[in-house]
Image: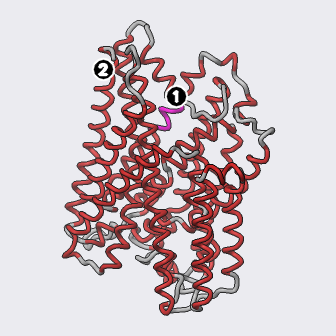
Amino acid sequence: MSFDSTLQIVVLLAVVMTLFSIIFKRVILAKQTTGGELSDYLFAHSKSTGGLDGSTTMLTAIASNFQTANALFVGLWFGYNFGFAIAVLSLFFASGVWLLYYLVRDLSDKQKKAVLQNKLLPYERIFAPENKRYSYYIAVLIYLSVIFAAVTEVWFGSRMAADIILPIVNAGAEPKTASADLLVPLTAALLAVFLLVYVYFGGYRAVAETDRIQTALIFAMLTILIVGVILNTASNLADWSWGSFTFGVGNFYSNYHYMISLFCGGIALNVFWQLVLPTQWQRAAAANSAKTYVDSLPGAGLGTLLTWSAPVLIGAMSAAANGATAGGVPTAFQGWLDLASAETFGSYVTGIVVAVVLGIAVAGIFSAALSTADTSIIIVVTKLVQVNNWGDGEFDLVRRRASMIVFVVFLLAGFLYWLDPPIDKLIFAVSTAQLFFAGYFWRYIKSGGSRLIDDSGRAIATIVCFAAFFALALVVNLVPAVSAAFPNFGFWLPVIALFIGVWMSNGLSGHED
């Protein structure tokens, strides 16, 4: 590694640490705000400050919806392989936020509070008291999915940060001694330490206090990506292909069976995902009122549309100017990396400036990962508190349990890195089963938050079907032999789960406790 590249790494890391020292200051302030109150730690509900205001609720939604796995990494991958045409899935994801707004806006104030401000997730609320024991079986699988969401954030956040740092580390070095196998675990460890600070000191209050900064970093990172891909394509405009921009380099037409399956499954997942997304319900409970949360949804949908579309656009531009082979993920920062290593007048200063820019980008990637991972872990901790009936007196115990979960997430992220499953299959494996409950939650919302399942036979059938979809989604998407035998079936599973869930919930009406 040359002197210049060493200095660039030092500057890049200094920028990341400086930005996060500012963020950590707010996290420590969040700890002081909680004052040992579990309600503030878990839901940002302080006796002195109340819950989240409208703008914070909206920004928290945008930041936590923009996941490094689902939005950034997948967006780049899809845009590169299938072009900007696939950005329609971003529109469908944002429409899911607006669908939720449509469902709750006409409820009475009492019904809105019952639906949105309950500390229990709807997965447990839909069961009548006499069937409460059945909800525990579902809860186990749901919270496993929530933990897995945190794992994917640590994994993908680490991979993308390593994609920026690795070329700088190897610049001028012969042989290229650094490798992703070494760098990704190091970035994952750094990300896990940041996550530990969030979880131990601030909990959900940390998310609330920092998402204004983190949302700004996410938008800055996306802007840097767009400028970077423009720099990278400027010298290749003669080779620009509008066909590749629109449909990517992944044989859009000849691979139509795959594309039809992906579109149908993706539309089903994206439109109805907000109804079944645990972090959405945690966020709703954190708002200072149900009305505040409802009013934040239109803006959250627009911000989600912008942040989800940008990576697809960047991937499509990379394909248009530099299209090579399908299956790859473009290095969207390559334009900046080339600028950093260019032998030009003022290259020393340029290299430092680029290192600062890329440091901001890494901070933005970490911010996206941390917002979702922190919220996911706090959801699991909330359940531990409810099961054990812990109160404010066990505040330190709760924080220690949360810290242990961070360690487990770090280890599982390492296992996922070793397993290295196909990204599209992984997303469908994690998300498919939960879509089974979309029909139930639709009726739960329209009933004003009342219990739905008061019959033990229907409760058992619900559990069996959900468990079957949970297992089937994992096997079909992640077991290579099964995935090869049924190559596109995993993409159709969300459609099937949605249809069966709607059919099984048909005729259910709400019952007061």
- Position in image of residue 145 (x %, y %): 49, 63
* Colouring scheme, one of rainbow, by chain, secondary structure, one colour: secondary structure
Give the x, y percent position of residue 488. Answer: 72, 52
In the figure, is residue 453 to the left or right of 367?
right
What is the secondary structure assignment of the residue under circle 1?
Answer: helix
Local packing at callout 2 (Cα closer than 10 Å; few below 14, some 14-19, many 20+) is: some
> Mark 2 belongs to which amino acid?
Thr
> Which residue is rendered at x = 27% and y = 71% of the image?
38
Dots 1 and 2: beta carbons under 8 Å?
Answer: no
Near-viewer residue (153 or 214) = 153
Q: CA distance from mark 1 to mark 2?
A: 24 Å
Q: Secondary structure at mark 2?
A: helix
Residue 224 sits inside the magenta stretch:
yes
Q: Main secondary structure of the magenta part?
A: helix
Left or right: residue 368 versus residue 307 is left
- For the record, the magenta segment spans 221-228
Residue under pointer 2: 6
Q: Is residue 277 left or right of residue 477?
A: left
- Residue 447's tag is none
Q: Residue at x 58, y 38 (%)?
A: 76
Q: Is residue 208 magenta?
A: no
Q: Quadrant of the N terminus?
A: top left
The residue indicated by pointer 1 is 227
In the rendered structure, which disc, 1 or 2, sits on the residue that comes first in sequence?
2
Residue at image x 36%, y 25%?
355
Left or right relative to 189: residue 129: right
Q: Taking 415 as reference, is 34 above or below it?
A: below
Write the residue at 20% across / 69% down.
36
The x and y percentages for residue 118 are 43, 78
Q: Nearer the viewer, mark 1 or mark 2?
A: 2
- Using the rendered view, name the quadrant where residue 498 is placed: bottom right
